[in-house]
Amino acid sequence: MKKTIIANWKMQLGFRDSQMLIKELKQKIKKTNSEIIVCPDYLSLSSAALVFKGTHLNLGAQDCAIKASGALTGEVSPASLRELGVTYVIIGHWERRTVLGEDSELINTKIKSALTAKLIPILCIGENLAEREAGLAKKVLLNQIKNALKDVKIKTTTGLIIAYEPIWAIGTGESIIPFEADTIHSFIKAEAAKVMGKKVRVVYGGSVNSVNANEFLKQKNVDGLLVGGASLNAKEFSLIVNN
Ligand code: PGA
């Protein structure tokens, strides 16, 4: 199966820099065997949709609302995202869980809302350093899987992606050993399949760059990568994609 490479720009770029990067990516990423998903901020989604049209660059949002429409000041509807040409949406990223206080119930509702709008959720899960050091990583991941995917139904195995992002590896320059990621991904796949009845793709995120990407992609259970910092530079990201 094709590997899936996701670029998560977070809120790192201003509007003009986002526009430049969108154009650069279109130029630099021509042929690739991977599926590429680019997730700019909300403001840049519509221009990215225009530029990426007809290319193999897919569009993802970094979040979505809990329902398609209604009185929800400041929120963005998954149905509108779909109308725009967005096909994926990141849900439950660590920064939203901790900095913005999103809990498991909210994340579960957002996943269902995304699926109703025919968006493919990219569910982020991961343990923090204290949990890892206490040997609790699997327990934490299992809890996150069970809570986020409660009563979630998908039609095919491509209907949802899980991103395993150990919190201690996000933006720190310290990634997990690829072989360890492989073992954890295998566990996540098995547990998610028990909850949903389908074995979904599991991608790795946390300090991925053009130097380590290939080692991760070689692992059997690593179906792709979620790239933050290294996706903000078109040259670096194209090296990861063309690995
Ligand atoms: P990073 O971020 O690649 O900068 O570690 C990954 C993420 O948070 O999705």
Image: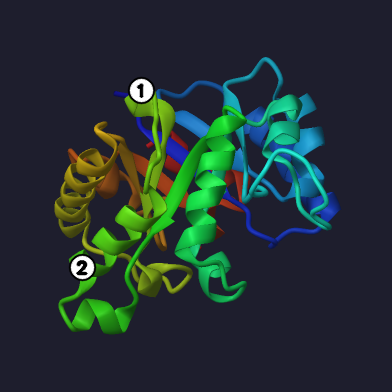
Q: What whole-number distance in Å separates the C-alpha atoms at marks 2 and 1?
A: 26 Å
Residue 239 visible in this rendered orientation of the protein: no
Q: Is residue 170 left or right of residue 60?
A: left
Question: The N terminus appears in which quarter of the rendering?
Answer: top left
Q: Is residue 134 left or right of residue 21?
A: left
Q: Nearer the viewer, residue 31 or 103?
A: 103
Q: Which mark is residue 171?
A: none
Q: Is residue 39 left or right of residue 107?
A: right
Q: Quadrant of residue 223?
A: top left
Q: Nearer the viewer, residue 84 or 168?
A: 84
Identify the element where label 1 is drawn.
Answer: loop
Q: What x and y, as percent, mark residue 33?
A: 40, 23
Amino acid tagged 2? Lys
State the residue at coordinates (76%, 33%): 80
State the residue at coordinates (40%, 61%): 206
Q: Which mark is residue 156?
A: 1
